[in-house]
Image: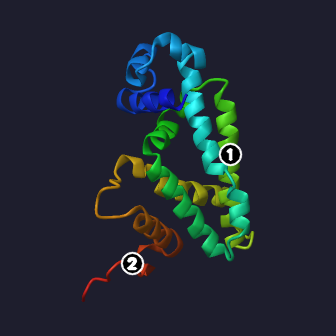
Amino acid sequence: MSKIGNAAVKLFNERGYLETTMDEISSAAKMSKGGIYHYFLTKSEILFFILNNFMDLLLEGLEEKLDGVEGDLEKIKFLIYRHIEYHTKYPSVSKTLLQQGHLLRSEYKTIAEKEKKYYQLVASVLSDFWGGRIEKERLTAITFTLFGMCNWIYSWYNPKGPVTAQELSEIIYQIFTRGIDQSPIFKKPKN
């Protein structure tokens, strides 16, 4: 099944989910169409399979790992590093989730529930950092700002480029927690 998912996610990224046909998926997976239908009756089942597995991967053991991290800033750092790690390790799936996930109909409810759980875990860590003193609307805005910093890397980040995923995580962490002017990773202009 992962052979089908891998072929499909590549096509969804190149052509788009709506434009990709089951014939193209079968050709890319080097399987007969009947072989694919043995596992998946529809293209939406394939998309659901891909996204559901990715969300399970993101959530797997996350609460327990967070419990083992000491300090609120370290938890934020851990979340950023982990998020970037998964989004750089699985860029096609990440991009598919962000660009194509909304195209699922009834199946999307399960994905949306998992996304909500992930959001709640991140928002909880950020809330703890501010001692629970930040109002809900601002916490939501701050949480989605962090997601924006992390999620859009699929559109520009080159894992073979000069900035490693770990360095990128550090840059995001520093900007998010200190701002650009206060971050030690940036050289200050000479006066």
Which amino acid, by three-letter code, is at mark 2? Ile
**Secondary structure category for the residue under label 1:** helix
Question: In terms of depth relative to the viewer, which is nearer, 175 or 166?
Answer: 166
Dot 2 and dot 1 residues touching (CB under 8 Å): no
Residue 182 lies, with reference to residue 5, above or below; the image says below
* One can see residue 138 in this view: yes
Residue found at the very far bottom of the displayed protein: 191
Name the residue: 59% across, 60% down.
142
Q: Residue 150: percent from the left, percent from the top?
A: 48, 56
Give the Cα separation between the discs numbered 2 and 1: 32 Å
Question: In terms of depth relative to the viewer, which is nearer, 63 or 151?
Answer: 63
The quarter of the picture where residue 139 lies is bottom right
Task: Bin the neighbour count of mark 2 within 10 Å (Cα to Cα): few under 14, some 14-19, many 20 and up.
Answer: few
What mark, if any, has residue 116 been given in the picture?
Answer: 1
**Secondary structure category for the residue under label 2:** loop
Q: Earlier in the sequence, mark 2 or mark 1?
A: 1
Which quarter of the rendered picture does the C terminus lie within?
A: bottom left
Q: Residue 34: percent from the left, percent from the top?
A: 51, 10
User: What colour-coding does the image apply?
Assistant: rainbow
The quarter of the picture where residue 45 lies is top right
Residue 39 lies, with reference to residue 98, above or below; the image says above
Task: Bin the neighbour count of mark 1 within 10 Å (Cα to Cα): few under 14, some 14-19, many 20 and up.
Answer: few
Name the residue: 69% across, 76% down.
70
Q: Residue 86: percent from the left, percent from the top?
A: 51, 52
Question: In terms of depth relative to the viewer, which is nearer, 157 or 146?
Answer: 157
Residue 58 lies, with reference to residue 81, above or below; the image says above
Which amino acid, by three-letter code, is at mark 1? Lys
- In the picture of the structure, the residue carrying the numbered disc 2 is 185
